[in-house]
Each structure stands twice: as structure tokens, then as C-alpha cells.
Amino acid sequence: MKGRNILLAAAIVAFWPVAATAQMYNTLPPNSVIANTLNYTNPAHALPFSELLKILNLYSLTKVADADYVMGNTDRVVATNKLASWFDPHTWTLPRAADFNPGQPLYVIDLGSKITAAKPLTIVRNTTAGDDRINGGISPVVINVANGAFVFISDGYSNWFAHSLVSPSTAPDGTIRSNISGITSTLDDNPISAVLDKLLGTTHGSLVYRGASSWSALNPGTLGQLLSTGGAGANPSWITASGTGTVTSITCFGSAITTIGTCATAATKSDQQAATSTTAVVTPSQQQSHPSAAKAWVRFTGASGAISQAYNVASVTRSSAGSYTLNFSTAFANTTYTCVGNIEDSGSNGIVKGASSGRSGSANPIFAVNLAGTSYDPATVEVACFGTQ
């Protein structure tokens, strides 16, 4: 037994210097460290810094194509792939905050310039075996513009700090850089109308007013209601007009009306026919209703009855030489109207005379005769009629 112990001690002494020597370096290559990169006990060796960074996974890039993705605790930069398609919206899930190095940034970037508002990327918290938060809440963050990016930093327990890295220097005219998605998202250049719709609603007929602490929208009232102000310090409202009373004055053109006739009114047909008002204003549609106005007039060719100019004469019927009937568009109220005429003819003088019978409210027969009393066709006949319609 004593011999065995002496032999074992000798073996240990003989091996120990060799093992110790394997663990020691007097010099190292430039930019290197002493390390063991294997998964079991092994003599250490010189490891270049570049290889160490790969092992620590500080600058790795994970490219994701047109797919959902669950990030791992070794991911550092996760990005869209420029060489792959991006047809649909997608959701990428963060690793658990407790599984990620505290303070280590995790970047999510649209390096492929694939993302649009119609095909956004939604980044959600990890709900596996925990209750992770993003900026203290449960809402996801969204990248909805090309080249958008977020940086995430874990607290090592259950919360991710998220911050958008997008900050363009220009924007389209008439837009406001904002987020109107309803959740934490990258900023977008939204039309002013869209921002107002988000803040105040989209109800047609709403009115915007300044409340005690912010701007608000007053929804439309019901038909016939009036907008009422409560004065300074109060919100406007819709009210229904009610009550009774007596009108004491009316203002017309800036002056109070105290007696009838101070403010002119439009003449009616009966006003024109009565021809007595000194205050009513005549409008074009009622001018001809006055007794002094011609209710119909016409200028036509004697040989054919063809009209060259007319008012309220629809046609002229020639039955024989010098015999004509004027057909009115709007009939006279009776047959007591009066017509006067004129003849233009370089070859013969004549007059226009009415027929002894056949007159009606809608038609009036006339004759053109020369000075000998014989009917004939003048070059031109002119007739004007006056009366009540």
C-alpha cells in the first residue's frame, strides 16, 4: 500500500507542470484574448477580437422575408430582406425581456424598403411565460413607412423601451407628421383632414369649438334647431326655438321699418294690373302685366305671314291676300283688348284694320288694305296689342 501511494504522488508531480504550462502564455498575437471556445474543459488558446465579437453576437443581422417571425435572445438586428418579396402585413414578436441582455439594443429595421401603410410590420410583446410590456403598456408598435426602424432595450425583467428612429427632414404639402394609427407607430405624413378626423371625428355637419381645456366637436343638432352661445367660458349648444311674442320692429337694408312702405317689396301680377302702388318694385317677370305694357307684338311678312320678330305671338296665319290671324302664346283675359298696326311697303300705302268678327282671347283676325279699301299683301306688317291677361 505504501508503495502505491508513493507511485501516485510521483505521477501527479510529473503531470502537474505539463497541465500548468498549457494554461499560460508569455505573449499573445495582436488584438486577441485567452479563451476556451469549446463546450467542455480544454486548454485555453489565443482568440482574435473578430472571432470574439462573433461569439458574443454583438453585430449579427437576421434577414426575414415575407413572413411572421419570433425573435430570439441572440438576435441583434432583424431586418426585411431587399432580395425577397413583401406581399402582406406581418407580425414580428420580441424575445422575452428577461431572456435578453439588459441594456443591449435590439434593432428592427426595414432595410429592404418593403414596408408601406398597406403592408405594415407590427412588432408585439412576447406573452410566453410572462407579462412583458412595451414602453410600459401592452400595445404593439408599428412600422408603416419604407425604411422605418425601431430600437428596443430590455430592462432584463419584463419591459422593453421602444423608440422610433425615423425622422425625415421633408414632408408633402398639406400634411402633418403624426401617428393616427391608434397604437404606438412610426410617424407618417398624414393629410390635415385625416388628423382632424382622428381628433374630432368624421360626423358630417359637426362644428369645431374651443372647450375649457382643448378643442372639441359639437355633433349636428336636429332639423330646425338653432346654434346658441353661452358666452365666454361656456360651450356652444343646439337649442330648439320656442315661445310666443310680438314683433315690434323689422329691419330692412339697415333701417328699422316702422310703417308700411318704408322697405320696397316686389310687385305681384295683381299689383301691376291695379297700377296703383307707389312702393312696389317691378321685376322682369311682372313688367308686362301693367296696363301700359304691350301684351303681344309682331312683325311679319305680308305675302307669307312669316314672323321676323315677335313677343307672345306664336304664329300668323295668312288665309288670303291681306287677311291674317294673330295667334297668341298667352291668351288675353277677354276680347276687349286693343291692337294697333303699321304697314311698311314702298309700292303702296295702306292701313291695318281689325275684323268685324272672329276675335277671341287667343286669336285676333286683322286685314291689310290699301287706300282704295282693297285687301293686299304689304311687304311688312307690324301689330301691337294691349289689354289684360
Image (tube, helix red, strand yellow):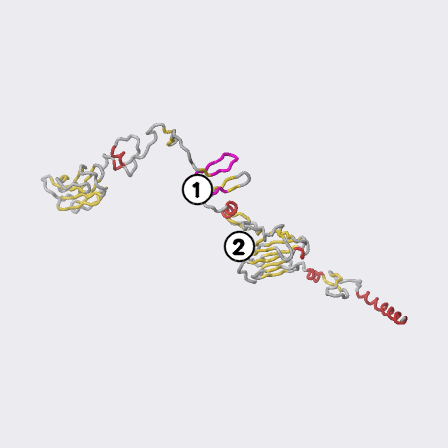
Amino acid type of disc 2? Ala
Q: CA distance from mark 2 to mark 1?
A: 38 Å
Classify mark 2: residues with Cα within 10 Å, few (<14), some (14-19) or many (20+).
Answer: some
Mark 2 against mark 1, which lies toward the viewer?
Answer: 1
Q: Residue 295, how many percent across, how many down? A: 22, 38
Mark 2 — residue?
A: 117
Of residues 106 and 210, the one drawn nearer to the viewer in this rendering: 210
Under circle 1, the secondary element is: loop
Q: Residue 122, how many percent across, how many down? A: 57, 55
- Find residue 222 and name its label: 1
Observer able to see residue 266:
yes
Asked if residue 235 is among those painted magenta in the image, a careful observer would answer yes
Q: Which residues are magenta?
A: 217-237
Residue 295 position (above or below residue 48): above
Mark with earlier residue (2, 1)? 2
Residue at figure coordinates x 27%, y 36% from the top left? 269
